[in-house]
Image (cartoon, rainbow, N blue to C red):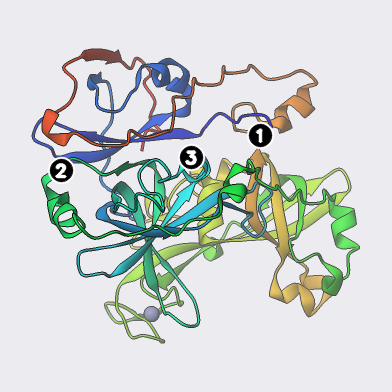
């Protein structure tokens, strides 16, 4: 499997006082910076931009607990995507025995084991510190909105950390054996490969010929060039920040007809046309995907109090760009042929991305390649010596790239 250059590298940086912030290294300078970057080293970073926390920013959590069990790794492909991911679920409990699920991905998932610390013959408790994980909620019929933590790009975990916060756990389990349930060894020996599920490639003529009721559940992929976005203000709506319902304008503000909240939030409803060599069709993207297509959050390109006529520049700039979309059908497409519209589930490739396969196909010669960044071992240390402090080695990183898109 060809290794993709990451879009960015996420980092958690701490200063001498211990205050932490989240940072990203943009794709363009990863090859220069990545081999130098190592956890626990001290760096002087110059030429960077500080952005206010994004509206979509999720605070990261550190948690400490004792491990009770973990599952074998599994391969999952999100609906409408092609690329599968490997995940493993680890369960921990706090001092009050509240259970929390932690989701590990990729190498972290595959390398996770407590075999060296906990066996049937030596059933010693294993305390785990998970750092910079993203709190999420999972929806199930039995347990509504039960929270769990998912690995972020800058996360890390430590087993049996040497920190004072872990002392209550060590004291509690000093004489108390606990065997951690885990997948059988035979299962662990089988190297896990992600099972990608390639979508069928269709052109517009082929998509148009498919009966809505025979449209594949997972959808199809198609490569198209954006031709037009209707030049009116229908590409966004004022939604309720909490429940996403369209809000009614009231005297001096907005009110949600469903939950009566009064905090408005603009969201995309992006209708556009796109074509390939076989025809032109209508496409639609909800807010989450539209944001990725436009590459700008809505609040950065629209001021609802000062509506300008004409399309804002970030929207105009996607016209004539080429995308490979994973598509399904909108609900309206089932009612009449005239309202057939393709719902964009995901963006699989785009011509303005470095190393895009779309450019290679168009120009007949490969685009300039970027060397794959050196990968450092993802096997975390088995213990954390916070009391020892960071290593006294100092490196200077001169980031000479003046990139505006650092965010
Ligand atoms: Zn609402």
Of the numbered discs 1 and 3, the one sitting upstream in the chain is 3
Identity of the residue drawn at 55% across and 65% down: 234
User: 10 Å neighbourhood of mark 1: few (<14), some, or many (≥20)?
Assistant: some
**C-alpha distance separating marks 1 and 3:** 35 Å
Estimate the x, y position of residue 86 in percent, counting from the top left: 57, 48
Numbered mark located on residue 163 in the image: 2
**Tag 1 near tag 2, CB within 8 Å:** no
Identify which residue is drawn at 24% across, 21% down: 45
Label 1 SS: loop
Say which residue label 3 marks. 111
- Measured from the top left, where is residue 131 in percent x and y? 29, 46
* Inter-mark Cα distance, 3 to 2: 23 Å
First in sequence, mark 3 or 2: give its number: 3
Q: Answer with left or right where residue 289 lies relative to residue 399.
A: right
Above or below 279: residue 304: below
Q: Residue at x 72, y 63 (%)?
A: 328
Q: Is residue 289 visible?
A: yes
Q: Residue at x 33, y 23 (%)?
A: 38
Q: What's the CA distance linking mark 1 and mark 2?
A: 49 Å
- Element at badge 2? loop
Q: Secondary structure at mark 3?
A: helix
Instruction: Please name the residue that numbered disc 1 is placed on.
Output: 351
- Give the tally of numbered discs: 3
Tell me the quadrant of ligand 1: bottom left
Q: Quadrant of residue 306?
A: bottom left
Q: Is residue 15 left or right of residue 143?
A: left
- Viewer-nearest of labels 1 and 2? 2
* Location of residue 229 by image quarter: bottom right
Pick whichever of labels 1 and 2 is earlier in the sequence.
2
Question: Which class describes the residues within 10 Å of circle 3: few (<14), some (14-19), or many (20+)?
Answer: some
């Amino acid at each position: 499997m060809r290794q993709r250059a990451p879009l960015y590298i996420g980092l958690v940086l701490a200063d001498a006082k211990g205050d932490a912030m989240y940072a990203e290294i943009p794709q363009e300078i990863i090859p220069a910076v990545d081999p130098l970057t190592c956890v626990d080293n001290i760096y002087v970073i110059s030429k960077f931009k500080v952005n206010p926390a994004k509206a979509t920013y999720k605070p990261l959590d550190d948690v400490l607990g004792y491990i009770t069990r973990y599952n074998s790794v599994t391969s999952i492909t999100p609906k409408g995507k092609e690329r599968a991911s490997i995940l493993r679920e680890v369960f921990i409990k706090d001092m009050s025995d509240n259970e929390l699920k932690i989701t590990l991905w990729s190498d972290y998932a595959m390398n996770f084991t407590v075999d060296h610390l906990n066996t049937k013959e030596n059933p010693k408790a294993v305390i785990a510190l998970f750092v910079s994980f993203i709190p999420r909620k999972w929806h199930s019929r039995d347990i509504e909105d039960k929270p769990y933590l998912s690995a972020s790009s800058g996360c890390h975990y430590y087993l049996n950390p040497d920190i004072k916060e872990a002392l209550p756990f060590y004291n509690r389990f000093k004489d108390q054996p606990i065997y951690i349930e885990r997948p059988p060894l035979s299962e662990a020996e089988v190297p896990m490969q992600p099972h990608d599920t390639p979508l069928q490639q269709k052109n517009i003529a082929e998509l148009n010929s498919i009966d809505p009721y025979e449209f594949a559940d997972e959808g199809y992929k198609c490569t198209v060039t954006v031709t037009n976005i209707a030049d009116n203000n229908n590409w966004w709506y004022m939604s309720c920040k909490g429940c996403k319902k369209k809000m009614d304008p009231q005297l001096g503000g907005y009110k949600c007809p469903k939950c009566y909240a009064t905090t408005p939030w603009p969201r995309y409803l992006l209708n556009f046309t796109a074509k390939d060599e076989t025809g032109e069709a209508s496409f639609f993207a909800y807010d989450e995907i539209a944001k990725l297509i436009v590459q700008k959050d809505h609040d950065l390109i629209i001021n609802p109090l000062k509506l300008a006529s004409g399309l804002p520049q970030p929207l105009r700039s996607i016209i004539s760009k080429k995308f490979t979309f994973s598509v399904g059908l909108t609900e309206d497409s089932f009612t009449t042929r005239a309202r057939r519209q393709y719902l964009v589930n995901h963006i699989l490739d785009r011509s303005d991305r470095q190393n895009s396969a779309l450019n290679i196909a168009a120009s007949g010669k490969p685009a300039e390649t970027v060397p794959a960044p050196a990968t450092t071992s993802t096997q975390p240390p088995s213990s954390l010596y916070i009391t020892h402090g960071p290593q006294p080695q100092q490196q200077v990183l001169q980031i000479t790239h003046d990139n505006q898109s650092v965010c």
